[in-house]
């Protein structure tokens, strides 16, 4: 019967370990999280490891090739408790695989989000985000004299509340 095990990888070599495991015909899973951030005023989408430094591998419990996994480039070894390798429940792997496509953490405001404006013209003014205005700016609504006014502000001057 096949079981999933948790493998520790060498620093920042999770993808290398997964490729080398695949080349050996060993099933592996390396969950990633897609994040969207504002970097220097520009929107960037980046994929990062959900569990940095770890990869899941699927092996036969009795006849699995544990030696080959331990000696794979990018792999440090198995997570163990005493002499036993740490098994991961299949339900957890299935849940991670199912949610993998839905995981999207965004730090960029969306239409209707409350943001704080902090630039030379406005200090700590709350505004409502409307839409992007090119790569480096955004259009916001601010309340000025009981009237909503539309302004365009640099992305570096806004922060999501």
Image (cartoon, grey):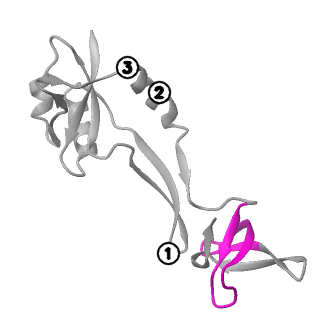
Of label 1 and label 2, which has the lower sequence position?
1
61 over 112 or under it: above or below? above
Structural distance between the alpha carbons of marks 3 and 2: 9 Å
- Who's the residue at 9% across and 34% down the image? 71
* Residue at which label 3 appears: 90
* Residue at which label 1 appears: 40
Percent coordinates x, y for residue 80 in the rendering: 17, 29
* Residue at which label 2 appears: 95
Q: Please name the predominant secondary structure of the magenta segment in the image.
A: strand
Which residue occupies the foreground of this view, 160 or 25? 160
The answer to whether residue 153 is visible is yes
Percent coordinates x, y for residue 126 in the rendering: 72, 73
Q: How many marks?
A: 3
Residue at the far front in the pictured view = 82
Which region is colored magenta?
113-140
100 over 94 or under it: above or below? below
Q: Secondary structure at mark 2?
A: helix
Which residue occupies the foreground of this view, 13 or 20? 13
Any mark on residue 138, and which?
none
- Who's the residue at 65% across and 62% down the image? 109
Percent coordinates x, y for residue 81 in the rendering: 17, 28
């Amino acid at each position: 019967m096949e079981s999933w095990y948790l493998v520790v990888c060498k620093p920042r070599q999770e993808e290398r370990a997964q490729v080398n495991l695949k080349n050996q015909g060993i099933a592996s899973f390396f969950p990633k999280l897609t994040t969207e951030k504002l970097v220097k005023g520009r929107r960037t989408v980046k994929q990062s490891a959900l569990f940095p430094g770890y990869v899941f591998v699927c092996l036969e419990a009795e006849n699995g090739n544990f030696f080959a996994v331990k000696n794979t480039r990018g792999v440090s070894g198995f997570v163990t408790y005493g002499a036993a390798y740490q098994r991961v429940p299949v339900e957890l792997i299935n849940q991670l695989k199912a949610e993998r496509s839905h995981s999207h953490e965004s730090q960029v405001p969306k239409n209707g989000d409350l943001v704080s404006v902090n630039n030379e013209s406005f200090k700590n003014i709350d505004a409502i985000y409307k839409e992007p205005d090119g790569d480096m700016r955004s259009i916001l609504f601010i309340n000025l004299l009981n009237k909503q006014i539309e302004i365009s502000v640099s992305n570096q001057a806004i922060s999501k509340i």
